[in-house]
Amino acid sequence: QVQLVESGGGLVQAGGSLRLSCAASGRTFSYHAMAWFRQAPGKEREFVAGISRSGGSTYYADSVKGRFTISRDNAKNTVYLQMNSLKPEDTAVYSCAATNVLVATPTLRDYGYWGQGTQVTVSS
């Protein structure tokens, strides 16, 4: 069982940066590939970025590639999402998720553990 708690969201101007954190409980954090998803009002939840269990492999949606960086610290049971050059279209609730699948897939149904989400609002 993994419990996830996100933090670091807020209001930022376009072009600015935010760093999201997701703290996990339990001693099995390093057994799970992790990902960040986001959901904007009126839209479906979408994959943003994923990271393998060791942190050696990362995956990004095309819309954030080159601007966002996912990382993890297994000693601290935490996964991060550094978001730079933010755009108004990045506005959404961002949630972290853990999967028992070997790699961090972009498929929503592969993830069995979810945080409550943190709001990111980017003003123009």
Image (cartoon, rainbow, N blue to C red):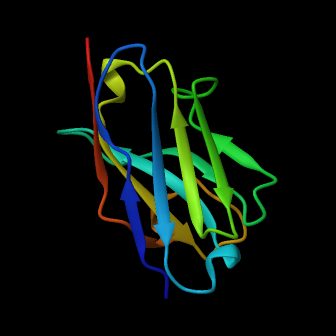
Residue 90 in picture, x, y percent from top left: 36, 28
Residue 59 in picture, x, y percent from top left: 67, 44
Q: Quadrant of residue 88?
A: top left
Specify whether residue 110 is in view.
no
Q: Does 100 sit above or below residue 123?
A: below
Q: Residue furthest left?
A: 42
Specify whether residue 5 is in view.
yes
Label count reads 0
For this view, does 40 lie left or right of residue 5? Answer: left
Image point 43% across, 50% down: which residue? 37
Q: Residue furthest right?
A: 56
Residue 33 in picture, x, y percent from top left: 65, 66
Q: Does 6 sit above or below residue 39?
A: below
Which residue is nearer to you in this view: 84 or 104? 84
Image point 61% across, 27% down: which residue? 65
Q: Does 69 sit above or below residue 33?
A: above
Image point 69% across, 68% down: which residue? 74
Image point 56% across, 36% down: which residue? 61
Residue 73 in picture, x, y percent from top left: 67, 61
The image quadrant where one finds the C terminus is top left
For this view, does 63 lie left or right of residue 6? Answer: right
